[in-house]
């Protein structure tokens, strides 16, 4: 599929043919650093001073490059489609090749960065449990009440794998048996022919 | 096939796969590896350089080294968890295909550290809100804005405990009057008597 670039985007990228190929390569490197770590205005100012152009032109050029890379990686477009999309900008063949090389080298990495962006539902990490028997309380002595205490550890929302939140739960044996049978039924649902048909058709 | 050291369940597939990797190193190096893994399980930390040196002869890649450490940790902690004696562990590991010399080395290390391992596992069992410290202070109230002569003792208790959900230290400060405190003390003494009867 072809990327459709907006007029504004094309205008921002039109700065690129005005500089050398080496500078475009440098901009590409800066753009990828920014995708990894976030932007830093000092670099824009330094580049603008060296090239003798206003800061906004440098900023738009780099941001236009970043957007081009992320959109291409997002849609996983092939080499041919990428070249066709860039053709519409009217750049020289050399510039097109530089942009293509940039895309090919880094699109896997950009996709992995993009895949971490949407916030996730907390995911299961670990379950610790303990079986206790309550023998007496202040009000009633001579009891025998079995209780199961659970600590469910979840990996945090958007904090990465490092943050853990623990939820403490308590259950009695009959509820526990019910939970077990429900979860086993859920597992068995994965083996039905309907589910298998769907799994076969997802590449 | 049900194995006692897996808690009377089937042995996990990855353990079966890695047993053959374990067989590749010599039994002497295996015993040293077991010592390292046991140190890690007992909380003393593992020296990865030593482990890589021990497995270097068998030309293990980094994935194989991690797998070896993982399978040894699983065998030791699972056997301690289900309180398996070393003869049963030895026969079950040989059934899985681990050579005899390796098995004897492993079981000897297991037997030496058996009770230490179980103690460590008992310590790390789930416990909510451990009480860390108690400090108290008795004040004597002379007078207040409500009543000119109060003349009553008051206890201030500061309890430092681990929060149940957060796991970090939480401080609770309570002030208790003399009568309420007598009731509290009596009830706690009864609970202590019940606990001692169980020991």
Image (cartoon, coloured by chain):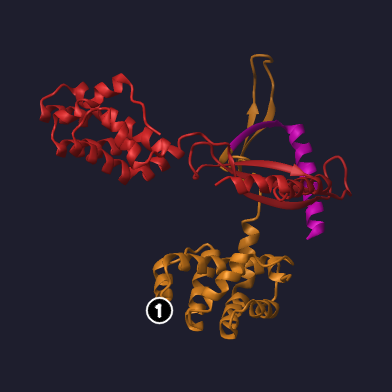
Chain colours: A red, B orange
Quarter assignment of residue A26: top left
Is residue B172 one of those drawn in magenta? Answer: yes
Q: Residue furthest top?
A: B146
Residue A115 included in the magenta stretch of the image: no
Chain letter, disc 1 residue:
B
| A151 relative position to B54: left or right | right
Q: What x and y, as percent, mark residue A176?
A: 78, 47
Instruction: Residue A130 in the image: state x and y as whole percent.
Output: 71, 52
Q: Work out whether B39 lies above or below B168.
A: below
Q: At 51% from the left edge and 34% from the top edge, which residue is drawn?
A: A119
Quadrant of the image containing the C terminus of chain B: bottom right
**Residue farthest to the bottom?**
B101
**Along the viewing direction, whichever of A96 and A147 lies nearer the viewer:** A96
Magenta extent: B171-199
Q: Is residue A21 left or right of residue B14?
A: left
Q: Which residue is mark 1?
A: B57
Q: Closest to the observer: B71 or A186?
A: A186
Q: Is residue B23 above or below residue A147?
A: below
Neighbour class for label 1 at 10 Å: few (<14), some, many (≥20)? Answer: few
Marker count (numbered)? 1
Res A71 visible:
yes
Residue B148 as seen in the image, left or right of residue B68: right
Q: Depth check: A156 or B19 in front?
A: B19
- The residue drawn where x is 57% and y is 70% is B17
């Amino acid at each position: 599929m072809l990327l459709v670039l907006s007029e504004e985007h094309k205008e921002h990228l039109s700065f690129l043919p005005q500089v050398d190929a080496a500078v475009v390569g440098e901009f590409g490197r800066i753009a990828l650093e920014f995708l990894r770590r976030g932007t830093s205005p000092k670099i824009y100012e330094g580049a603008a001073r060296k090239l003798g152009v206003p800061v906004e032109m440098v900023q738009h050029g780099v941001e236009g490059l970043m957007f081009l890379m992320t959109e291409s990686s997002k849609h996983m477009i092939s080499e041919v489609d990428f070249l066709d999309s860039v053709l519409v900008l009217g750049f020289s063949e050399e510039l097109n090749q530089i942009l293509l090389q940039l895309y090919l080298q880094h699109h896997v990495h950009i996709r992995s960065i993009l895949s971490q962006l949407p916030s996730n539902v907390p995911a299961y990490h670990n379950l610790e449990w303990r079986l206790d028997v309550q023998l007496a309380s202040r009000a009633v002595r001579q009891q025998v009440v079995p209780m199961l205490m659970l600590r469910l550890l979840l990996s945090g929302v958007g904090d990465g794998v490092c943050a853990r939140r623990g939820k403490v739960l308590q259950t009695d044996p009959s509820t526990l048996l019910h939970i077990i049978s429900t979860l086993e039924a859920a597992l068995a649902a994965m083996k039905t022919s309907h589910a298998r048909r769907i799994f076969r058709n997802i590449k | 096939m049900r194995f006692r050291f897996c808690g009377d369940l089937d042995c996990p597939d990855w353990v079966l796969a890695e047993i053959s990797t374990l067989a590749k190193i010599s039994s002497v190096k295996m015993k040293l590896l077991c010592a390292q893994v046991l140190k890690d399980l007992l909380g003393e930390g593992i020296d990865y350089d030593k482990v890589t040196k021990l497995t270097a002869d068998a030309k293990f890649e980094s994935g194989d080294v991690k797998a070896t450490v993982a399978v040894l940790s699983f065998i030791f902690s699972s056997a301690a968890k289900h309180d398996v004696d070393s003869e049963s562990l030895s026969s079950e590991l040989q059934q899985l295909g681990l050579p005899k010399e390796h098995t004897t080395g492993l079981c000897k290390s297991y037997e030496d550290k058996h009770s230490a391992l179980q103690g460590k596992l008992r310590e790390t069992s789930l416990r909510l809100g451990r009480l860390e410290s108690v400090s108290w202070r008795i004040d004597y109230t002379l007078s207040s804005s409500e009543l000119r002569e109060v003349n009553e003792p008051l206890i201030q208790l500061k309890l430092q405990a681990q929060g149940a959900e957060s796991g970090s230290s939480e401080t609770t400060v309570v002030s208790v009057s003399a009568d309420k405190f007598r009731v509290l003390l009596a009830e706690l003494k009864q609970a202590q008597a019940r606990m001692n009867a169980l020991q």
